[in-house]
Image: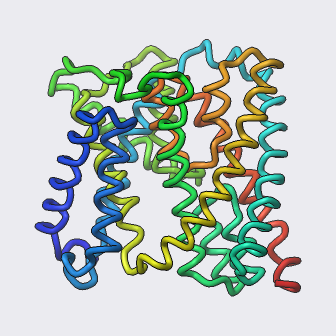
Amino acid sequence: MVSMQHPVTTFALLGLCAIAGFVGQWAGLPLPFLIGPLLVSATLATALPLHLPDGYVFPNWLRVTFITVIGLIIGAQVTADLFQTLPRLGVSFAALALFVVLSHGFNYAVFRRLGGYDRATAFYSASPGGLFEALAMGEEAGADPARLTLQQFLRVILVVTLMPIGLSLWMGAPVGSSSGMTFARDDVPWSSLPLIALAGLAGIGGGHLLRLPARQLTGPMAAAAALSISGLYHIDMPQWLVNLAQIVVGTALGMRFTGLGPAVILRGARLSLISVGGMLLLAAAFAEALHLFMGEPFDVMLISFAPGGVTEMALVALSLQANPALVTLHHIWRILVTVIGLALTGRLLRRYL
């Protein structure tokens, strides 16, 4: 409830981050309304923490609300055509499970050998998914919570930042929202907002009841998909709401660094660059193999394997018009495989870590 005591701070922070988003859009930055706010809020949280009130925490309810918006956008893109690809997904899902195992092993070596982390901290920092599950299990196993939190959030942030920039360089032109790609519309009437809100609430409720992974995202996604496939209602999202959702999610990500000193972050960032760089190279190898085998576009497969957060990678997919529903299915599977692996090995590892 601490965050509710500082509504003016939250409003001012979002205003500053919104300006950063528009500056990023003007500068041609990929995903400007996500990356711009992320960079500004992370700078405030680490280099200028005295400018924030004591004990300030970004409101989680606000972050969850706008993650719901992103889930609705993704679900609205689900059509009957997507289900025609399901028989082929067995191949990519099997490849993704192998990717998880290889990535975890590589990351463990980086954090253990290069970083000098203890075994528990290195093992759970190495997890290529299941951020909050890895944090909970890691702390229970005796991992250093500060370093573990830092490495897990850096993984998500670096992937979200590097992916669109790397694809822009590879394609030789701006991609995503910086090149005008979007699934939103500018002409959505205000009268649609109550129906959008009802669909979001129904999705969140269903996600909690079914205990879905990343339920704030997948619950609304399932609700919007059901409406779309049934033909009852197709959700069209106004562009301003999509931009606002990215600003809130980016700001919340950056504020995760509150309380960590610049020296600690720089050391963690060096390790994360090696870790994330290795995983993205591995993801590119799998993406190219599946592109040749399945005929799926390379960029869709690359985004599907990139080990970022479900919400953030869904935003990347949305901005690239890269079949966000298919991408999200792969990321949910990646997280399930990772979390199940952590749970199955947890008891055994506690004997040795």
Q: Quadrant of residue 237?
A: top left
From the viewer's side, name the closer residue of 224 and 327: 327
From the viewer's side, name the closer residue of 241 and 18: 18
**Does residue 218 appear in the picture of this structure?**
no
Q: Is 295 displayed left or right of 187 in the figure?
A: right
In the figure, 136 relative to 156: above or below? below
**Does residue 84 appear in the picture of this structure?**
yes
Q: Quadrant of residue 182?
A: top left
Residue 325 horizontal/vertical position (percent) = 56, 29
Q: Is 71 displayed left or right of 128 in the figure?
A: left
What residue do we see at 25% from left, 73% from top? 3
From the viewer's side, name the closer residue of 135 and 283: 283
What is the quadrant of the C terminus in the image? bottom right
Q: How is the image coloured?
A: rainbow
In the figure, 303 relative to 144: above or below? above
Residue 280 horizontal/vertical position (percent) = 67, 44
What residue do we see at 87% from left, 86% from top? 351
Most extreme residue toward the left is: 8
What is the quadrant of the N terminus in the image? bottom left
What residue do we see at 49% from left, 54% from top? 157
**Tally of numbered tags:** 0
Residue 170 horizontal/vertical position (percent) = 56, 27
Q: Is 240 displayed left or right of 142 in the figure?
A: left
What residue do we see at 56% from left, 71% from top? 268
Residue 338 horizontal/vertical position (percent) = 73, 56
In the figure, 262 relative to 19: above or below? below
In the figure, 196 relative to 107: above or below? above
Q: Quadrant of residue 44?
A: bottom left
